[in-house]
Image: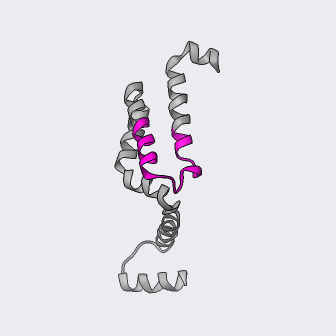
Amino acid sequence: MGYLFDRYPILGKAYALTEKIRNWYDKKNIRKDMDFVERDLYDWFDDVIASKIPAFRAVRRMMEKHYDDIINYFREGHTNAKAENMNGKIQRFMANNFGIRDRSFFFFRLVGYFS
């Protein structure tokens, strides 16, 4: 990989940024000091700005938009995966039943389906 990174330095920068965010978003950082976690994330943001790689700028904007949810993961280690799974099931249920016409009857059927 050293030869490849010497020949294409932008690829080396992208690889380093990817590894840095992977190491940061690891389970070992759950329940660590929030100042430490936030400082490392802001350091990564600064590295993204310095790299001038457009794809990472988009990732940075997305992470800034969902900053509170991302940092909240490191407080207790909980995600919203269960809620997203339930939302997907409800969406599939709606698609299989050709949408919603009568809201109260839909909720009646939904409760029966998921109980």
User: Does 90 sit above or below residue 45?
Assistant: below
Question: Looking at the figure, which quarter contains the C terminus?
Answer: bottom right
Res. 52 visible in picture = no
**Along the viewing direction, whichever of 10 and 115 lies nearer the viewer:** 10
Q: Is residue 25 above or below residue 19?
A: below
- Which residue appears at 52% of the width and 43% of the height? 24
Picture coordinates of residue 70 (x, y %)? 44, 53
Q: Quadrant of residue 42?
A: top left
| Residue drawn at 39 percent across, 26 percent down | 50
In the image, residue 62 lies in the stretch drawn in magenta: no
Front position in the image: 83 or 67: 67
Using the rendered image of the protein, determine whether residue 34 is visible from the camera's viewpoint: yes
Q: Is residue 56 above or below residue 83?
A: above
Q: How many labels sit on residues?
A: 0
Q: Which residues are magenta?
A: 21-44
Q: Is residue 45 left or right of residue 89?
A: left
